[in-house]
Amino acid sequence: MVEKKKKIKSEMNTIQHPLFGISFKNWIKILCKNGGFDLRFFPRVIFVTISSISLIPARFLFKVLYDSKINNTEIEKPPVFIIGHWRSGTTYLHELLSYDPQFCYITLWNTLLPDSFLILNPMKEFLSRFLPPTRPMDQIEVAADGPYEDEAGLSVLYDWSFFHALHFPGNAEEQYLKSIHFHDFTDKELENWKRIYLKFLKTVSFENSGKRLILKNPPNSTRIKEILEIFPDAKFIHIYRNPYKVYLSTKKMRTKVLDKLSLQNAYEEEIEEQVINNYKRLMKSLFEQKDHIPDGNLIEISYEDLVADPLNQVKEIYSTLGLKGFEQAKPELEKYLNSKKDYKTNVYRIDKKIIDNVKKHWDFTIKLWDYKPPK
């Protein structure tokens, strides 16, 4: 007798969906490529469909007014890319560094409307009312103007994005392999990805008068070679964390995020397998590719060291990467740290079965960084 898979519950408390800014053409394309949607998610599909059609004038006006300006924009200061597996401290580091006024960053607002936000900025306050107050996985405050990961914007602009693995869990494996590892990508698909990504970054740079971009996106951990083709002098910060905690936090994140983002049914057994396999594939690819980064353009830090002594860790980042302005930024960094001093991280219980499973599959990083199971 075949054991029935356990479906992840979706409360469907909201029909709002972050793909609402997608073009109608892209929306139909990704629905077809990913096997459509399950009926209980029909309200979300209708919401995205109606909003994508209603935003056609804004996208057209954006193209008319800004396309040539953005295409002629040069990103002169090499961006800083924060990489590392999900739930390894990338968000914390990104938010901290975003307080340095020399940097600009991709905001949540930018990712929701990547090809029309310059037109719709006057409506930002109204549309922001549809956002949840906190992130579902860790209760970090959600703000339209706060730093966000570029992958969310790519999911609106392109067929292949890791976020589509969350929107369409029935096609999660193909979305993961193609969007993160460019598996079976044609030359045309890869060139399209680089073109779309670069234009998105140029749009944000244009809005911010050419400030240096500080970007956070775990999928970029496996795209180092492609990023270096676009930005040969790009800077990279790899942050890592105790793999046992990464496992627990990632599994929780995937389950909670699917509740908010999914357009298809998802199953617990599949999530477990994906969390284990994706970590191995992403980290091994990162280790293989990081040797392509020129000397002086990569620093690796642990989340634990960053939390224990954030200012000295940031100072080391600036020194290693040749970034100026630490002393000038220090008062602003302290403001962020003071605002988070009462924040409590999630507490996890970990049993022997989980410890054995994580050690079995992720021993290559556990040994490398000499981590022990949390007590």
Image: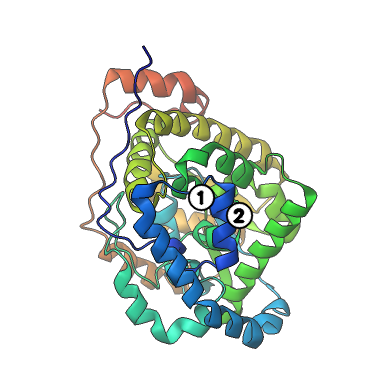
Q: Is residue 337 visible?
A: yes
Q: Quadrant of the C terminus?
A: top left
Q: Position of residue 6 (x, y in %)?
A: 32, 29
Q: Position of residue 310 (x, y in %)?
A: 38, 55
Circle number at residue 164 = 1
Label 2: which secondary element:
loop
Residue at image location 51% in from the left, 40% down from the top? 172
Q: Residue furthest top?
A: 1
The residue at which mark 2 appears reads as 159
Label 1: which secondary element:
helix
Which of disc 1 and disc 2 is earlier in sequence?
Answer: 2
Residue at image location 41% in from the left, 46% down from the top? 38
Q: Residue furthest right?
A: 187
Give the image quarter of residue 335.
Answer: bottom left
In screen coordinates, is 259 left or right of 318? left
Q: Amino acid at mark 2?
A: Asp
Q: How is the rendered protein coloured?
A: rainbow
Front residue of this view, candidates 311 and 74: 74
Give the image quarter of residue 323.
Answer: bottom right
Q: Position of residue 325 (x, y in %)?
A: 52, 71
Q: Are marks 2 and 1 in contact (CB under 8 Å)?
A: yes
Residue 267's place in the image compared with 38, above or below, is above
Front residue of this view, candidates 46 and 248: 46
Circle number at residue 294 = none
Q: Amino acid at mark 1?
A: His
